[in-house]
Image (cartoon, rainbow, N blue to C red):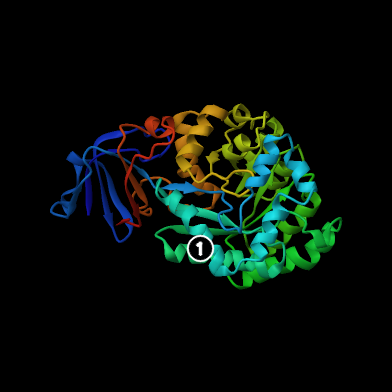
Amino acid sequence: MILGNIQLATMQTGAGILPAAAVVIGDGAIRWSGPEAALPAAFHGRDRLDGGGRLLTPGLIDCHTHLVHGGHRAAEFEARLNGATYADIARAGGGIASTMRATRAATEADLVAQALPRLDALLAEGVTTVEIKSGYGLEIDTELRMLRAARALGLQRMVSVRTTYLAAHALPPEFAGAAQAYLDRVCLPGLAAAHALTLADAVDGFCETIAFDAAQMAQVFDAARALGLPVKLHAEQLSASGGARLAARYGALSADHLEHADAGDAAAMAAAGTVAVLLPGAFYALRETVRPPVAAFRAAGVAMAVATDMNPGTSPLTSILLAINMACTLFRLTVDEAMAGVTRNAARALGLADRGVIAPGLRADLCLWNVESTAELCYRIGFNPLHQRFVQGVPC
């Protein structure tokens, strides 16, 4: 199929927007792209879809979500409005522990049913690949159930789902004050089980004063490395805890949040090729005042991705378009940076080399938009201009 009469944003570095362009799609992949006037003769006569002059981009990638979970935490939102902090809520048995109880009580079918509307909201805004973490079971059976639910979502919708094992998210009440015992009895055996069942594409953790320290996270990363699984890390969100440099030391795909990172962290991440995943939804919901060091990331050459961090407590955000607007307005990303953040850099944050830009040989995951430029995608608030989504060349 030829998708013609489009404005083409390949999202390759420095490419800009090509007017009067076309893309050739075949067998789920991109076969050719460029000015329609230069379409090779070998493709003449193929079925042609008129893009109506619309903007074509790669499919959007949400590279950090907690989409699968039980229940909600609206009461904690109210508590924060009344002055409670994230740490206050966590120490009082709320936060992740609250979602843990609801998730443990849910069946796999329950988790899928609850997650589908959240997933559908992302797909409606052009998401074609989504990462989904475990981390609310905090016991082996429920962690695996969450991962199975995430895999099931990818079978029920036209979307590529990448799963991440996040048992090192918080300590459940039964292991209060016993982090090493939790790692030994739950997190590490659960990781081995998830790998054996091919349920995990990557391994993540929360390196923070209210979660796990860098030495504890190193044990998880060592186990992941032994299994051949890539790692990611929630790092420097609430304090400077050494997570970003730990992630870099292990060659992590990404370090995420990073509000309290510094120039030294940026240098280490740049040397390791670790992507900085910025999560403005959490910054906004928690009313944080310390921003990620975007200027330091730019100066060091750290690739920056943007994601929703969709979760029930600190970023109940199911709009990838709002996430890129927030990244621009709150973190001062440029339009090019924000768009790269949900395309090519988001693909890097998931270790996926087959998507994120429009180029021959890559997956034909595409979005056709009723806009004139990528700037319009970043600038509008509460408006969805998606005309058509394609997953491996199939309109959906």
Q: Which residue is mark 1?
A: 113
Residue 217 lies, in percent from the top left, at: 75, 53
- Measured from the top left, where is residue 146 in percent x and y? 60, 64
> In which quadrant will I find the N terminus?
bottom left
Q: Secondary structure at mark 1?
A: helix
Q: Residue at x 37, y 31 (%)?
A: 376
Compared to residue 25, the image places residue 188 above or below, namely below
Q: Residue furthest left?
A: 45
In the picture, measured across the screen, residue 209 lies left or right of residue 379, that is: right
Seen in the picture, residue 207 relative to 302 is either above or below; the reply is below
Residue 215, percent from left and from top? 80, 51
In what quadrant of the picture does the C terminus appear? bottom left
* Residue 372 in view of the camera: yes
Residue nearest the viewer, comparing 383 with 138: 383
- Amino acid type of disc 1? Ala
Q: Please give the name of the residue rendered at 41% of the width and 61% of the height, measured from the top-left corner.
A: 157
Q: Is residue 136 left or right of residue 364?
A: right
Front one among 369 and 335: 369
